Image: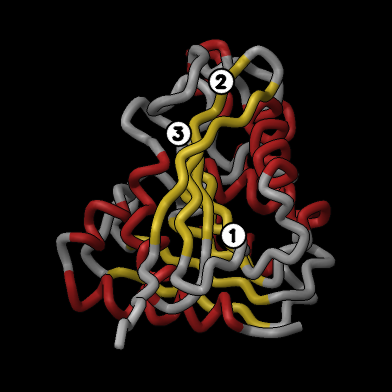
Amino acid sequence: MFVIIFRMWTEECAVEVGAERLAATKIYAATGQPPSVISFHGAGSTATRARIRYVLDYFAEHGVSSACFDFSGHGESTGNMARANLRMREQEARAVAEFLNCQNLRAIIGTSMGAHIAAILAPALKPRSLILFCPAAYPQDAMDLPFDSAFTEMVRQPGAYVNSPAFPALHAFPGDLLIIAGKQDAVIPREVVDLYIESAAMARSKKVIWLEECGHQIHPWLQQHAEERDAVLRDVLVTSQYRM
């Protein structure tokens, strides 16, 4: 008698968005179901789709397929990060979601800048849940600025995040919102997390997990702290499994 055991597997692909070619990975559960979770990574020269793989591999182990990609100028994608802006990030994320045919999204996972993008795309992509790690929020006037010194100066002004388009985008979000943040984060003020929670006035559920000793580099920190990592992974999975 032969026993066939199906295991998770991955598929590398690329998405053409404008002049750029974005590298993407689909992580399939043993069920072979198409991706129902998509992840948007953060900003910075070291940010790539690889950062979130420990979360997406966990999803696959529990029967949920997912996808992640590198924004232009990051990882294995083409482009120049210094010439990009938040509007481009929004367009790239939308295009990848459409390429993946993500019409029944369990969840969007966003990290830092990617959380801002996840929030503003929530009305269009209609995920059942939003899972945001150390979420950033940028002012409306920063959306079209290239990622240069002028952008940095604007977003670092005290309280600049208050008029972020991420917050009104969440006003009618009906799903489940989970935020994981570090209490020692020196980049994202705690008030940003509070505004995300307050803005999601119609959310079915809202929860914040505060990691006591964690700073802004949340994914490397979690991978080095097994107890906290395992607890976060369980919450992330439960949040993504809620039904509308």
Residue 108 position, x and y percent, is 60, 59
Q: Residues within 10 Å of mark 3 (few under 14, many from 20)?
A: some
Image coordinates for residue 71, horizontal then vertical, percent: 52, 30
In the rendered view of the protein, which quadrant contains the C terminus? bottom right
- Element assignment for label 2: helix
Amino acid type for the residue under numbered disc 3: Ala
Q: Residue furthest bottom?
A: 1
Q: Secondary structure at mark 3?
A: loop
Does label 2 or label 1 sit earlier along the sequence?
1
The amino acid sitting under disc 2 is Phe
Residue for badge 3: 43
Q: Check the picture and name the quadrant holding the N terminus.
A: bottom left
The structure residue drawn at horizontal position 28% and vertical position 57%, both measured from the top left corner, is 184
Q: Is residue 81 above or below residue 213?
A: above
Q: Which residue is mark 1?
A: 35
Q: Which residue appears at 39% of the width and 72% of the height?
A: 6
